[in-house]
Amino acid sequence: MQVHRSIDNLPAFSNAVITIGTFDGVHEGHKKIIDALIREARSVQGEAIIVTFHPHPRKIVNPNEHLQLINTLDEKIELLNKTGIDHLVIVPFNGQFASQTADEYIEHFLIQKFHPHTIIIGYDHHFGKSRQGNFMLLAQKADIYSYRLLEIPKYILEEVAVSSTQIRTALLKSDVATANKLLGYDFFFEGVVIEGDKLGRKLGYPTANLQYTDSDKIHLGHGVYAAYAEVGEIKYSGMLSIGNRPTLENSNERIEINIFDFDKDIYGETVRVIVKKYLRGQEKYSSLDELKKQLSIDKENSLAVL
């Protein structure tokens, strides 16, 4: 898969078959659209192209809205690379791009940049200033610009929308089992290791305190999870805790992972956490000894999963 981060130097595509969307999550619903895109491209000896936008259009249109995205841009690229598409075009989305009329969007963007053989789009897709462009306008222009227009079935679009909402809701509620099933892979996030108060070390369970690498990345609900930690090229078993540590008073939210059989100094490094299973909620214990006993149980339960 070739990744293009500018629309000014795109190659001359051969029989370009394109679809456009955010593809947040690159989940099982999205894969049906992507599979159809690839099949269509192969049937005309063409190239399968996904067009997406960065930053997310809602950040430009509604700058005060706090986004909760399933994937960062780098994660999306990684996941789409596994699907078999030929090109991913990441359009820098800004006020100037958003101000194009629907006709300008078709002529100056879709036609001049891609010369599409086929456009695959949903019936409810809107584009251009004030979202004035739609499927019907693309259909009216098809003969003028000599492209085929195919519609993504309504049931698949609804499945995609429902899945995305269900995944976000599940993650916020700590329901990793549902989220991972709908995603078709285990939810993961990355964090930079920062200084903590080293309480875990005193209890015999040293943790890496993490700070999300992307503020738009959705946060898991509070709780304790069985998880893997990827440090460099090596994947370790561990247990993840997210929450306010109720046993300690006035504690801010912490994201901590106890990496089993690991004792390296990784401050400042980026760790990928792959979340396998929710174990329990955050609980308040009467003493640190009680907490230590529970951590021992959590480790056993994590190892049983991992």
Image (cartoon, rainbow, N blue to C red):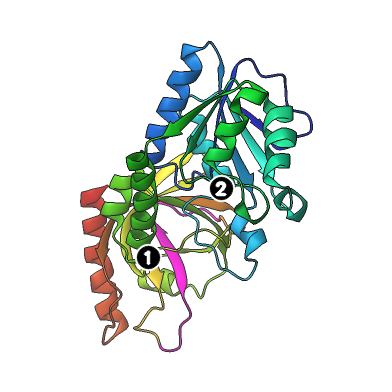
Q: Give whichever of discs 2 and 1 has the lower sequence position.
A: 2
Q: Is residue 238 visible?
A: no
Badge 2 vs badge 1, beta-carbon distance below 8 Å: no
Residue 90 placement (x, y as % from top left): 65, 39
Q: Main secondary structure of the magenta part?
A: loop
Say if 220 sits above or below 164 in the image.
below
Give amino acid for label 1: Leu
Q: Range of the magenta residues?
A: 249-265
Q: Nearer the viewer, residue 167 or 165?
A: 165
Residue 75 placement (x, y as % from top left): 53, 44
**Badge nearest the viewer, 2 or 1:** 2
Give amino acid for label 2: His
Residue 130 placement (x, y as % from top left): 64, 56
In the rendered image, residue 251 lying in the magenta stretch gets the answer yes
Q: Which residue is mark 1?
A: 172
Within 10 Å of the Cα at label 1, are there few (<14), some (14-19), or many (20+) other Cα atoms?
A: some
Residue 41 placement (x, y as % from top left): 50, 18
Image quarter where the N terminus lies is: top right
Q: Is residue 152 visible?
A: yes
Q: Is residue 183 left or right of residue 211?
A: left
Residue shown at 44% from the left, 75% from the top: 199
Label of residue 83 in the image: none
Q: How many marks?
A: 2
Say if 110 sits above or below 59 in the image.
above
Residue shown at 52% from the left, 58% from the top: 217
* Quarter-of-image position of residue 3: top right
Q: Is residue 162 left or right of residue 111?
A: left
Q: Which residue is mark 2?
A: 126
Residue shown at 59% from the left, 41% from the top: 52
Within 10 Å of the Cα at label 2, are there few (<14), some (14-19), or many (20+) other Cα atoms?
A: some
In the rendered image, residue 261 lying in the magenta stretch gets the answer yes
